[in-house]
Amino acid sequence: MASGTNFGVLFLIGFLIKSGIAQTSYNAAVIEYAKSSDSSVSDLDNMMLRLRDYESLISNLKSSNIIVFPEYGLTTPYLPENLEPLSTFVPDPAENISPCSTKDSYEKVLIDLSCTAQTHGVFVVVNLIEKSISSSNTTIFYNTNVVFNGSGTVVARYRKINLCKEPKFTKGENVATFTAFGVNFGLMTSCDLLYEHPARTMLANTNVTDIIYPHAWVAETPFLHSLSIQDGFAKANGINLLSATYRNSSDGMGGFGIFSAKSATTSLDISTGISYKSSTGNLEKLTNKMPEAVCNNNIEITPRIGGVPPSIDKFNNTIENLNLYTTKDLVVTDNIAKVQICSEGSLFCCDFYVEFQDGYASSNSPVYKVAAFYGTKQVNITGKNLGFRTCALLVCANNDLQSCGETPPDSSPIKQISLQANLPKGDRTLYMPSTLKKDLHPLTGYAFCQNVEGDVIGTTMSANNVEKLWTFGIVGRVYDLDDRPEGRGTASYFRSGFGLILMLIATQFFFQ
């Protein structure tokens, strides 16, 4: 009896290890992918050719626990008028259906993906065009992420809620979550990251610690570049983020990676000249999100692993209209600059301290500016007006403000940089760091700290030994200002006089 019991225990332990439940980390693979259409064959044939690439990648990456493919990878974002040939019904996860086994009612693309996941025993996340029948008995289409488990069963289905200039699709309504190998995942797509629902809705779910993020993000400089905003979102909210991207550098699409909540060693990359690339990394299984009010003062962290620096002259960034920002030139005396910048018409202010390495020469350096904005502005990827609180140090090509969104020349090495701001605490705001270097990567080692005091979030950022900087600041989404006309906010952002007093005290302390 004892021998049988021991065998059973060993069998259970082996099963748990193989399934990943007993391990403290898991391995993820994310894909950057693009394959142009062949005009000599049909749209469906082109999709099936891409599917063959997917099957090969799954086979090569099957040692990972989960493989994430990008938004629009199977179809490209450049869709034909008729979506019917490229679409498929997708089963409700509650029905526990494996299309590989059932086959009825599903197109070959879904069946083959299910069978490939089953063959290799790996979780697979794929973005595709889902068709459905509406209440009025018409066919409608969704931009949908589908999750297959290692048995080929559909365990999650997420219909994109916030469409990015996608008139052919119907918007989804509900968040989607699932649990795999002991990790609680949530799903978002592309510009969903900018919106209260599902971004804050997902974060409000205390069980969700890891977010899967297929996207075809269109980069907007200087504040909304792909890797910059992904890194900031993961760090500010204490989550792991698995990002897979459609790549088209001529249209500003690219940038993918595995972002750790603890900013530990992980992988990210951005490229311009290949059809597809994969990135793998191990992530710690989190029992809960890292508390956002905890400040990690150890900024000498292990750098993230990046690929070969991209040929950024081939990456076509969309430049944000910076004319709404209040700006000041950075005045450097004895290698040091201290400056406060406030968005015109509001009490939103940020304080900067910058210390350059010895040898800083202003005559040979690019132009350094600090900028602040509180109000509503249009975001290119959405085509809509969204509310923001943003402040940052910018490295600019010349004195023209719009040049701050262009690739800057090499900046002087910075010995130390810090930012301080007192931000209003509200249920409808979300703040994150925004950092970008000339190579289109975020900074690898910096501290971002948020400490709540009543109605105010005391926010600081700091970094040491920074080279080739482009942007260093905070991006805050203010959902209450969405869909208003473009312009600066005019009302005080504080909800109490106590907040103003705190800001004045902090400013006086900063400039002592």
Image: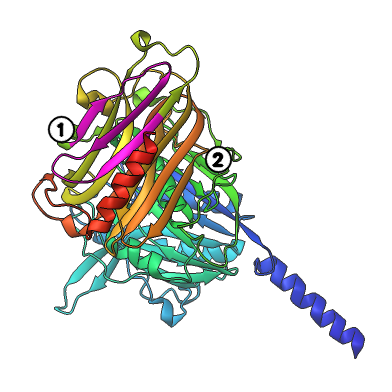
In the picture, measured across the screen, residue 398 lies left or right of residue 114, that is left
Q: Which of 150 and 317 is in front in this view?
A: 317
Judge the density around disc 1: few (<14), some (14-19), many (≥20) Cα neighbours within 10 Å: few
Please say whether residue 131 is one of the residues in the magenta stretch: no
Residue at label 1?
323
Q: How is colour applied across the structure in the image?
A: rainbow
Q: What residue type is labelled 1?
A: Asn
Q: What residue type is labelled 2?
A: Ile
The disc placed on residue 299 is 2
Q: Against 293, is 510 above or below?
A: above
Q: Which residue lies furthest to the top in this view?
A: 363
In the picture, measured across the screen, residue 502 lies left or right of residue 299, that is left
Residue 373 rendering spot, x and y as whole percentages: 21, 41
Residue 298 location, quadrant: top right
What residue appears at the point 48 percent right and 11 percent down from the top-left corner?
359
> Regarding mark 2 in the picture, which secondary structure is present there?
loop
**Res 475 seen here:** no
Residue range of the region highlighted in magenta in the rendering = 325-353
Mark closest to the chain's N terminus, 2 or 1? 2
Mark 2 or 1: the one toward you: 2
What residue appears at the point 21 percent right and 25 percent down from the top-left corner?
401
Residue 168 location, quadrant: bottom left
